[in-house]
Image: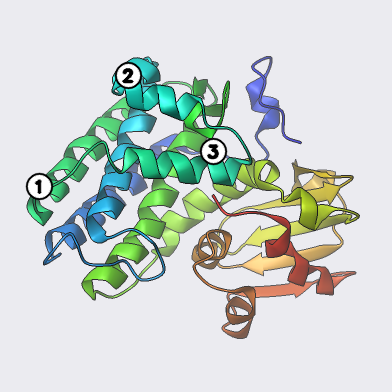
Amino acid sequence: MTDTGTSDPRRNVVVEVDLAALRAALEREAHRVRGLARTARTLSAPVPGLEWDTGKLLTHLVMVYRAFAIAVRGEDFEAALEEAKQSALLRLTGRLDKVIGQINDVMAELVVFENADEAADALEQEATALCTALAAETDPHRRVSTPWYGEGATRTVATAAALALNETLLHGIDLARAVGAAETVPHDAAALAAPLVMSEMLPELLDLDAAEGFKGHFGVALRGSQRFVVSVAEGRAWSSRWEEQRRDCVMSMRPGTALLLGMRRIPLWRAMATGGVVSYGRMPWKAMQFPKLFVSA
């Protein structure tokens, strides 16, 4: 599994990193999503496919930006949130996807907006704060504390930026569905987020039950972006550089499709039927197992 230690964080990154490009994409996509938020007629409208209403979705995104900004600035995450609520967060345990789900529920109660304009203003404020923190960063490989992923968890600054961008893209789709707008995942933004998000997060989201007895090496080729390998064997998962690991199966994916697939927004069969995912190699059938091996955060 990808090491999360601090001895030499650069050796853990299996894809190329462009922090300035990530920050620019985040700024651009946050502005687009903020515009969608202002079109919401009511914050109580349901979000198709999610248990949240529109207000809770926007609260979640605001808290995502705030949490990552706190992390990048090196501030105390516990002190930044209301003490009682944060104590509850720290007591949560279990599989990573379950913990994150519980944290989302707690965070959704921290801020309540009166109307769409107020929510959009909060999105602008928190996204700007995060982008400002990223602009001041000189080392994209520096590890920062991200306790909402578990006690002692860290991410590189670049991965934090990619995760924030990923959240913006995915919840931009959710928000578009809620307000009746066109659904879009811009290729350039997805091509920046997907390599880091997938190579860094998938090893931590392995479903141990589904992976029992499974062994395979998946080449992930993100079209117009980067390539890497995700391996699963003996109840663990890890990422490798493309040239370091032989592949059983190569999955050629559109970056936007890869992000939607990873967050269960579309099923694999539909992604394959529309050309968003194409598998080939020595054992192309193993691609059908890929999404089943990982839980969604």
**Secondary structure state at the residue bearing disc 1:** helix
Q: What residue type is labelled 3?
A: Val
Q: At 41% across and 69% down in the image, what residue appears?
A: 49
Q: Quadrant of residue 72?
A: top left
Q: Is residue 243 above or below residue 285?
A: above
Q: At 71% across and 28% down in the image, what residue appears?
A: 3
* Display colour scheme: rainbow
Q: Which amino acid does label 1 sit on?
A: Glu
Q: In this view, does 10 lie above or below 186?
A: above
Which residue is the site of mark 2? 83
Pointer 2 local density, CA inside 10 Å: few below 14, some 14–19, many at least 20: few
What is the spatial separation of the Cα atoms under label 3 and label 1, in whole angstroms?
A: 34 Å
Q: In which quarter of the image is residue 130?
A: top left
Q: Where is residue 69 shown, x and y percent of the image?
A: 34, 28
| Mark toward the viewer: 1 or 2 | 2
* Mark 1 and mark 2 residues within 8 Å of each other at the beta carbon: no
Q: Where is residue 133 shown, x and y percent of the image?
A: 31, 26
Q: Is residue 5 left or right of residue 188?
A: right
Q: Is residue 9 left or right of residue 99?
A: right
Pointer 3 local density, CA inside 10 Å: few below 14, some 14–19, many at least 20: some
Which residue is the site of mark 1? 118
What is the spatial separation of the Cα atoms under label 3 and label 2, in whole angstroms?
A: 35 Å
Which residue is the site of mark 3? 17
Q: At 71% across and 63% down in the image, what residue appears?
A: 292
